[in-house]
Amino acid sequence: MDTRRTPRSADRSVSRSGGPHRRTRGAVSTAAGLLATAALLVSACSSGSSTTSATAAADEAALVALPRATPAALTSYYDQKPAWRGCGVPGFQCATIKAPLDYAEPAAGDVRLAVSRKKATGPGERLGSLLVNPGGPGGSAIGYVQAYAGIGYPAEVRARYDMVAVDPRGVARSEPVECLDGPEMDRHTQTDTTPDDAKETDGLVEAYRTFAEGCGADAPRLLRHVSTVEAARDMDIVRAVLGDEKLNYVGASYGTFLGATYAGLFPDRTGRLVLDGAMDPSLSARRLNLEQTAGFETAFRSFARDCVRHADCPLGGAGTSPDQVGKNLKAFFEKLDARPAATGDADGRRLTESLATTGVIAAMYDEGAWQQLREALTSAMKENDGSGLLALSDGYYERDADGGYSNLMFANAAVNCLDLPPAFDTPDEARRALPKFQKASPVFGEGLAWAALNCAYWPVHATGEPHRIEAKGAAPIVVVGTTRDPATPYRWAQALAGQLSSARLLTYEGDGHTAYGRGSSCIDRTINAYLLGGTPPKDGKRCS
């Protein structure tokens, strides 16, 4: 499962889903976190167990806080003094700190974590550091802070906080996991994710195996230690190294899971936390993927209603129902399955059904990309020119013009497949689940069900299970949910707010993935007031 964030105000020229997030092309900028999620070949492995028994266990299990005292074996990590240096990005400093590869055996070796900050500009009393994470998992927090948060967050927030980001272990600048080279990844993203027969099913399984084997060969030790719990423990080291008594944090999409995990482990060190586009840690992988599939359907129906109001909508005219718009799009996907469209790509890629589906899903993260999607669909459906949809897909996968890929998708799978058991263990299990997924989304359900099979072939066994996070004793935490969020359905925000003992639920009634910095003055004022004054909103506050 891949949940990423797409801030409307981000510089679209920058890249990375987690990184400024995505370098996206044109109007869509998927950022990490746009975040853990379901969709597509690589990004569909979400944290969770495939069994109902695991879900039942989650009703009883809650994340247990760690002892308040720092273990003697970790003292040297907490006492580090970072050597700050220039980053080549005006106004930002960078440093590298160490964390234990394995917290159970700190003497077994270290992992190097990249950190970047932009110091508070003033005026006003400095409030400490504000860590940010855009989601994924796999999004570069450093890319995000340098390209967006450190320059695009409200001036009054940047005036009083040092804006800080750490790339989680295995991500971007922090010992990144690598699995496939560019040409290999090109082949992987074109794999048919709606197999029609045994041969195509075998081809999909082989693609997942090749991907997993590449990750295992690249980082056999690190791959066992990129869990969300370990990343949260790393953040506590960063907090201490920065000299802060408590962690102040804004996490989007998967970043909400990371932030909530921190609060569950260190409730007494939890400061002002904003969890925007929340995930529900109590769900199994299968349930996460199924509910996210329904979320993309909700977003698509909003797009469909908007599309037919425009004369250039290639999926239907005025009055065409969302159901029929979906059928028209599905028919187009099936046409591509039989005969991919030309794209003019320098590497000879054609627009396959899988790439087109990815392109459409990418545009669901931000309604600001809907016009771009209409234009791309028109070119593909009426002129057999798939270049627009290919560009949207490339933005989602963070593929650059030279054919290289960021490590977003590699880290995404590495974290998700370690956090919890796979959604499906065999192709037969995925096939039997197709009716439920297709009911959740007639347009995307089939492909997303098969995409949830990828963790079945992971070279490392999962170390986590679904669980509640209560964070008893933590200061008030603001959980933000968007009612028509495609990647993190609103119900997840309600669920997380119901688990966290000090949560205040803030609702944005609207479209798109996440809410802060996306155009709602009500949301922005409420979150800014909390970050600057420490006063959380009334539980249940709603904005539009």
Image: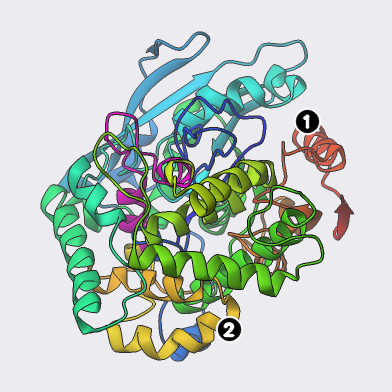
Tell me the kind of residue under disc 1: Leu
Does the magenta segment cover residue 301? no
Q: Residue 122 at x, y = what percent?
A: 72, 11
Query: Is residue 81 in view from this perspective?
Result: no
The three-letter code of the residue at mark 2 reads Lys
- Compared to residue 89, the image places residue 64 above or below, namely below
Q: Earlier in the sequence, mark 2 or mark 1?
A: 2
Quarter of the rendering occupied by the N terminus: bottom left
Q: Residue furthest front?
A: 383
Secondary element under disc 2, as helix, strand or loop, is helix
- Place of residue 290 in the rendered image (x, y in percent of width and height, measured from the top left): 53, 76
- Rendered residue at 75%/49% (across/down): 311
Front in this rendered view, residue 23 or 394: 394
Tally the marks: 2
Name the colouring of the figure.
rainbow
Residue 116 location (% of width, % of height): 45, 23
Foreground: disc 2 or disc 1? 2
Q: Identify the residue shown where x is 68% and y is 52%.
A: 313
Residue 221 seen in this snapshot:
yes
| Residue located at (50% from left, 88% from top) | 435
Residue in the foreground of this view, choosing between 331 and 280: 331
Please report the bounds of the magenta region as a residue range.
389-416
- Residue placed under numbered mark 2 in the picture: 439
Q: Image point 17% across, 69% down: which residue?
A: 206
Judging by the rendered image, the residue that carries numbered circle 1 is 532
Magenta stretch, main secondary structure class: helix
- The residue tagged with tag 1: helix, strand or loop? helix
Q: Residue 21: x percent and y percent?
A: 50, 36
Local packing at callout 2 (Cα closer than 10 Å; few below 14, some 14-19, many 20+) is some
